[in-house]
Amino acid sequence: MTNCSKNLLLPILLLLLTIQAMAQTDECMMCHGDRSLSYERNNKLVSLFVDENKFAKSVHADLDCSDCHMDFDAEDIPHRAGDNIYKVDCATCHYDYAEEYHESLHGQALAQGKFLAPDCTTCHGKHDILPHTNEKSKTYVMNIPDLCGTCHKEGTRVSALRTISQRHILENYKESIHGDGLFRRGLIVTAVCTSCHFSHNILPHENPKSSINRNNIASTCMQCHTQIEKVHTKVIRGELWEQQPHVIPACIDCHQPHQVRRVFYDQKYDDAKCMSCHSNKDLYKEVNGEKVSLYVDTNDLAHSVHKDNTCIKCHTNVSHFSNPICKESGKVDCSICHASQVEEWQLSQHSIELVNGNVDAPYCNDCHGTHKVQKKTDRTSPTFARNIPDLCGKCHNIGGPGKSILEDEFGIVKDYSQSIHGSLLESGLTVTATCVDCHSAHRELPEKNPLSTVHKDNVGETCAKCHLGIYEQFTNSIHSPLITQTDKELPGCQDCHQAHTIKRTDKDDFRAEIIDQCGRCHEDVTDTYFDTLHGKVSKLGSIGAAKCYDCHGSHNILPTYIVGSTLHRENIVETCASCHPNSNRKFVGYLTHATHHDKDKYPFLYYTFWFMTILLSVTFLFFGTHTLLWLPRGLAERRKAKLEKKNNSTGNPVNGK
């Protein structure tokens, strides 16, 4: 047989089988397509009608009737002889699922003859079975709660046989965080009944094989909460979830099944047990020879952001095997809830100092407090904008433990209070920049660290959080690395505006200093500036005389040949007019930074300067020499004149005559 004939034979065989199945189905539907077809069973009329349209859309549409309905003679019509036609056995194709079902609560109840026990058709249907991905399927994820709720909700015959707490399973689920995600938000990746109890092997929680057994619940939850080990590693040493579940709280100890909320539920470690000891003001422990109070003020806790949390949510390493249960439970790890903030803090200089043994380095509670943690929007909170400088100043002031940071004679916070940012804060403007706006709240790093928010490569983005318009101008200027490609270091915000002593730009002291700031890079140009009238007047102390940024701009500095430059020929008249109202094209035609020192750029000035210098030098030299040569004769003539005057007055003859 050739390859060509083989290739043709396979589709032909499939076509013949399909035609045969269709023929058999059509033959069955000749009777079962009749809506009135029925039989009597236990004095009840049972319909034998099959909706052909629904069957054609089902997952079994390609099967023949006899593939499921076996153990009878299809040719012997009517087939039924008493009750000899066996019920369809789904295990013929779905053996693994059937095995799980037979071991489950549902399967065992059905085997015991309980008429309320569900079988395959109860959940999947009969001739209208659809894939679980079909939105119209009973087993589609959005429909699972309602499917299970046909039995497990208030008012059903099944719920009447259950305990009070088990009668409201569906109602409780709909109010839970999982139900909220499914019903109110349409989030189909949230957990439904089959996510926790599974589809076919539903077992009671006492059964060691049950997906909700205490020893297995962590694995069940980890189907969705894949980071649970990572999140809870700091809580209960990770692997103990599976290896020693009897030692530590299981998921359901804090998150009650069917009632999972956004807050912790605690069944074993209630707050009353904790406060029975910690309400005592005299309770303390010794740390390095010092007494540390263990008293908890319930009033502080009641007014904190954690007022709805139970003690165990923060103090997680407690155990009934310890006496007291919190013995050696260790420091609270805030990363349980605030993982991203703690990850940033771990990169900070504060964390590095603490790891290296600096006992003065701050931890979370040093800034936020312990049991009275307040929102940063609360005016009495240490982290409220107005209070930030004082909070940071506890360390970063003269004499504070943060003195390792370079300071001037006033200290960082003192300097800040004198700056424009600090002045605005003192005036009541809480939207001005504070320590955390520049250094970040948790990832404080030295400015030389490339990850620091005040590093020279990052400081622009940091300032842009408030000064966005200025930053956008700067990124398009000649000083921006996006515009100028050079090996030389380009200036950033911090080069012109000091960190903690930043001044108002319209004040005299800033204008007086700007020439020196620009001169650090543009030394030659600054020298030529002082050759001009503007520069000479500035040297004499005039604040009003034009400084660098009056002509070139401050953040939008561009080469003069670019149209956007303030000194472009289209803009220069307007620029000069800000000081010289009568400015015109002829007025602005003078050479601003022209200097006689540059022979290549200004040869006319260079040679003129030297011509005039030589001319004046020769002239002064000639007449100076003449004066020096004439000086002895002049002195002699002067003495002679004095002598003649003296002799004339006494009558003595001159020269002996």
Image: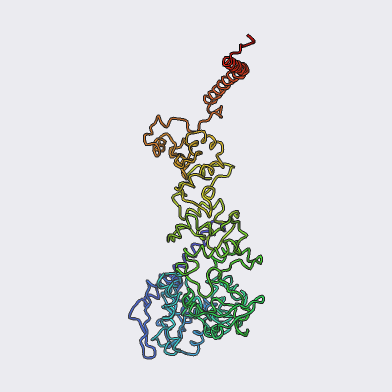
The image's colour scheme reads rainbow
Q: Is residue 538 above or below residue 55?
A: above
Query: In this view of the protein, can residue 98 be seen by the observer?
Result: no
Nearer to us in this view, 200 or 483 = 483
Nearer to us in this view, 471 or 108 = 471
Task: Judge left or right: residue 632 versus residue 434.
Answer: right
Rendered image quadrant of residue 229? bottom right
Task: Judge left or right: residue 34 versus residue 454.
Answer: left
Rendered image quadrant of residue 431? bottom left
Q: Is residue 550 above or below residue 298?
A: above
* Quadrant location of the C terminus in the rendered image: top right
| Residue 252 placement (x, y as % from top left) | 53, 80
**Residue at image point 45% right, 37% down:** 562
| Residue 358 placement (x, y as % from top left) | 64, 66
| Residue 220 placement (x, y as % from top left) | 54, 76
Nearer to us in this view, 121 or 545 = 545
How many numbered marks are there? 0
Nearer to us in this view, 237 or 340 = 340
* Quadrant location of the N terminus in the rendered image: bottom right
**Residue at image point 39% right, 88% down:** 41
Which residue is at the far left?
Answer: 36
Which residue is at the far top?
Answer: 657
| Residue 413 placement (x, y as % from top left) | 53, 59
Q: Is residue 72 above or below residue 233?
A: below
Query: In this view of the protein, can residue 112 be seen by the observer?
Result: yes
